[in-house]
Amino acid sequence: MKNIYYLKNKVQEYEWGSKTMMSAFVDNPDGNRLAELWIGTHPKAPSLVSENGKEITLGQLIQANPDFMLGPSASRFQNGLPFLMKIVSVENPLSIQVHPNEEQAKSGFARESALPLDSPERNYRDANQKSEIICALSDFTLLCGFRKPGEIYDLFKMTVHRGLKEEIELLKKRNIKDFFHTLLNFDRVRRKVLLSEFVASASSRIGMQDEAFPLCMELIDKYPGDVTALMPLMLNLIKLKPGEALNITTGCLHTYINGLGIELMTNSDNVVRAGLTSKHIDLQELMNITAFEPDITIPYRPERNSNGLAAYETDASEFTLAEIEVRQTPFVSPQERGADILLCVDGSLQITFLEGSPSDIKQGESVIVPSGAGSYRLSGKASVFKASVYAANL
């Protein structure tokens, strides 16, 4: 087994992706909308490695020697990589969505077992909870978690008080859940009337009131007739600066609006959607798993230690995320650690082990450093993101 393996990663193309944002990582001669670069073992688009002159998947490499690759946590994660790392480039909003916790995922997956795994009617394609962290590489805008009821009340009363005269009284009782359910249950005609009232009322207030107004106008234009275009009035509008991050917990309603970022998530395809999509929407399940308490979501930027490492705090028990600035002083990893995936986002560096020649890692390249390779040193001038298998016993 080697000390490092260079990863050949696959790109997903979606309508919300960008033609230009991912240029530092992927060539795009055809000008396609590149949305996500996947780094991991997901069967839909696994990373590839070279081993003994053959190209195999990263999953096959790990399965051949899980203890060497993953370290002490191999058996805990069924000898597989428990996370998926992504670069996401967002030019248009994603669907408004929520992810389940472990109990919800297991029961939902069992409940939908009669449906084919690729059925568009499925919410659950596995039995895993889905938590994630987003870290901005550029200015990054998203909606995440509910505002306070009084704030939601003020924004709706300011713009659609005639169309929601009775419904918004629920917000005076701090009843976000029933207000949300009522709004999404409106028929096509009432949705059209409500959205028209918002456009007429908010047009005169653009630039003078909450910045959610112009975003709603943009969403109404892109998704005509979709009442969830008004979700910026209900959800926190958050703007991350490069290096800032946000943990997106299970049950948190959210969507990405625009920007380039690193996303690290547990291995799960479980998504329950609320709107801004042509895909399956299950309102009952959405109501079951969404957390309707106001969520004070605060972006954060971790402090960097003397080793050049800034560790992001997450609630996940599967992974850790850190950003390493390699400058005059080399970064030196611990001797005992889990598997590390290193993604160079800027500059270039060399990785050196106790034995063997150094290897170069350039901007846009990624490698996996097996746990069994021991301590390594990074030198040069670069910015590197490190996704690691969480090892509680280290």
Image: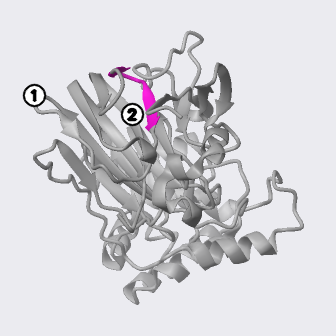
Instruction: Report how far apart the C-alphas of labels 1 and 2 lie in the structure.
Output: 19 Å
Q: Residue at x 64, y 19 (%)?
A: 53
Q: Which residue is mark 2?
A: 343
Give the vertical position of 86 relative to 122 (above or below): above
Is residue 202 at least partly visible in the picture?
Answer: no
Q: Earlier in the sequence, mark 1 or mark 2?
A: 1
Is residue 93 at least partly visible in the picture?
Answer: yes
Q: Residue at x 43, y 19 (%)?
A: 23
Residue type for callout 1: Gln
Does residue 76 appear to the left or right of 135 in the view shown?
right
Q: Residue at x 52, y 80 (%)?
A: 177
Q: Which residue is mark 1?
A: 328
Q: Is residue 359 magenta?
A: yes
Residue 133, horizontal then vertical, whole percent: 40, 54
Judging depth in this view, the residue of 166 and 227 nearest the camera is: 227
Secondary structure mostly seen in the magenta stretch: strand
| Quarter that holds the C terminus | bottom left
Marks 1, 2: nearer the viewer: 1
Callout 1 crowding tier (Cα within 10 Å): few <14, some 14–19, many ≥20: few
Q: Which residues are magenta?
A: 358-368
